[in-house]
Amino acid sequence: MTIPIGVTLHNPLNLRPSQPPWEGQTGEQNVGSAGVFCTFKDNTFGFRAAVRNLIAYADRAGINTVRGVIERWAPSSENDTKAYVVAVCNRTGFEADKPINLHGYEDCYNLLHAMTVQEQGSFDAYFKQWELDEGLRRAGIADVPPTPLHKRVTAIGGAVAAASTVAPQIQSTVAQYAPDLANSPSTTLRTLWHVAAFVGGALAIYGSIQLSRKQGV
């Protein structure tokens, strides 16, 4: 099976080079008669650039319909623009000339998902939902739902914050029951005191993470 050029270049929407270059763009590639396309570090940066392009259409040119976007994105000089519009409308349920919200997650996700299918022949065969979600997030779409990765990072951050509060309490408790250990002339006893505090902090982190898992975070 031939891999589409946009997949190879991490460029799901087949973006052309622009000035200044897109964030995450690593270069350009000439694809013969098809012209020159951007290459990106990974798919998330490719999706991000596509989202920023859509936002520019809306903010600078007032383009916020499927027909308006596709006529600019895939002009009839290079594409069957009418068929492109019909295909995207069929996949999304959008009306060709009804305004959509290019600053909102749902409309932007559905539009780009459908356009990716049109550009690369498939979405699911080459891309992941989280890659498009991350591209939307990096592009500034505010209402992107948290992915499992972002949920887990948030949970671990909370656990570490909780542990930073608990650890001094553990140290205080250790000092209360063994007040001379921290200042003992014995290196071994001082080391034991610090190890006890460290283990207590580690257990606090572990307990917080386990609690977050039970809560389905």
Image (cartoon, helix red, strand yellow):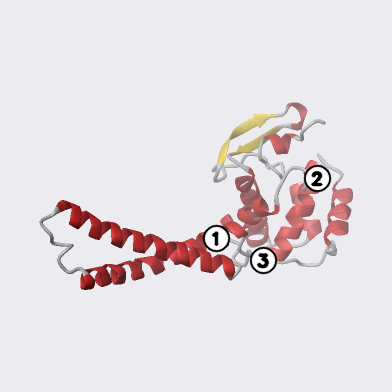
**The residue tagged with tag 3: helix, strand or loop?**
loop
Q: Amino acid at mark 3?
A: Gly
Which residue in the protein does label 1 denote? 152
Q: Quadrant of residue 76?
A: top right
Counting every numbered tag in the picture gives 3
* Identity of the residue furthest to the left in this view: 185
Name the N-terminal-most of marks 3 and 1.
3
Q: Amino acid at mark 2?
A: Ser
Which residue in the protein does label 3 denote? 104
Residue 122 numbered mark, or none:
2
**Rendered residue at 71%/59% (across/down):** 109
**Rendered residue at 76%/59% (across/down):** 110
Q: Amino acid at mark 1?
A: Arg
**Rendered residue at 29%/62% (across/down):** 197
> x, y percentage for residue 188?
19, 52
**The residue tagged with tag 2: helix, strand or loop?**
loop
216 or 89, which is in the foreground?
Answer: 216
> x, y percentage for residue 33?
77, 28
Quadrant of the image containing the C terminus:
bottom right
**The residue tagged with tag 1: helix, strand or loop?**
helix
> x, y percentage for residue 157?
45, 62
User: Is 111 rendered above or below residue 117?
Assistant: below
The answer to whether one can see residue 51 in this image is yes
Name the N-terminal-most of marks 3 and 2.
3
* Separation of marks 3 and 1 at Cα, in angstroms: 24 Å
* Separation of marks 1 and 2 at Cα, in angstroms: 29 Å
* Identity of the residue furthest to the top in this view: 32
Which mark lies nearer to you, 3 or 2?
A: 2
Name the N-terminal-most of marks 1 and 2.
2
Quadrant of the image containing the N terminus:
top right
* Separation of marks 3 and 2 at Cα, in angstroms: 23 Å
Q: Give the left or right position of residue 190, taking residue 90 as reference.
A: left
